Image (tube, rainbow, N blue to C red):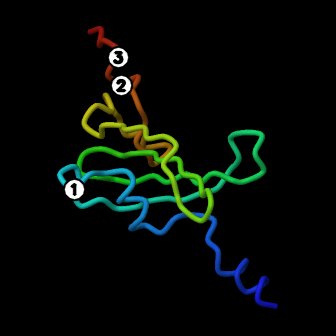
Amino acid sequence: MLQALFVACSSKTPPDSKIIELLFSADEKKNPDVLFKKVGNLDDDPELESFSLVRNGTEEVLGIFKKQKGEWYLLGKFSFSLLNIGPLHYDVSKSSWLPGESDSQKKKRVL
């Protein structure tokens, strides 16, 4: 009974505060916000890894974490700048923003 309670309480993903602590030093923090958490398996080890996407100022950071001996560890950190996303255009037919330039901007008008 006690073992079942322990398993139910153990988390598959680290808490948001731990994610932010492992990803950023005190001077790197720019109002970080955890946007997404997911678990998956990257290796032969049956223990799952946790993936977290965090927005921090003008960047988004993908962190990969693993729990070993009851502690969460950072396995990898990948940063993406939101300022360098490139050109976008709005496609009215799809009601969404799409990467690249629109076809109408590429065509030259012939009179």
Q: CA distance from mark 3 to mark 2?
A: 7 Å
Q: Amino acid at mark 3?
A: Lys
Furthest residue toward left: 27
| 25 relative position to 67: left or right | left
Q: Is residue 103 above or below residue 99?
A: above
Q: Nearer the viewer, mark 3 or mark 2?
A: 2
Q: Residue at x 31, y 51 (%)?
A: 24
Check the image and name the residue furthest to the top: 110
Q: Name the residue furthest right.
A: 1
Q: Relative to residue 2, is residue 84 depicted above or below?
A: above
Horizontal relation, residue 34 to residue 47: left or right: left
Quarter of the image for residue 26 reads: bottom left
Give the secondary structure at mark 2: loop
* Mark closer to the observer (2, 1): 1
* Earlier-in-chain disc, 2 versus 1: 1
* C-beta proximity under 8 Å, tags 1 and 3: no
Pinpoint residue 83: horizontal percent, then vertical percent: 25, 36
| Residue 26's disc number | 1
Q: Quadrant of residue 18?
A: bottom left
Neighbor class of circle 1 (other Cα within 10 Å; few <14, some 14-19, many 20+) is: few
Q: Give me the C-alpha separation between circle 1 and circle 3.
A: 46 Å
Q: Earlier in the sequence, mark 1 or mark 3?
A: 1
Q: Residue 101 — which label?
A: 2
The quadrant the C terminus occupies is top left
Viewer-nearest residue: 76 or 102 = 76
Q: Are marks 3 and 2 in contact (CB under 8 Å)?
A: yes
1 vs 3, front mark: 1
Pointer 3 residue: 106
Residue 20 at what x, y percent from top left?
Answer: 36, 59
Q: Residues within 10 Å of mark 3 (few under 14, many from 20)?
A: few
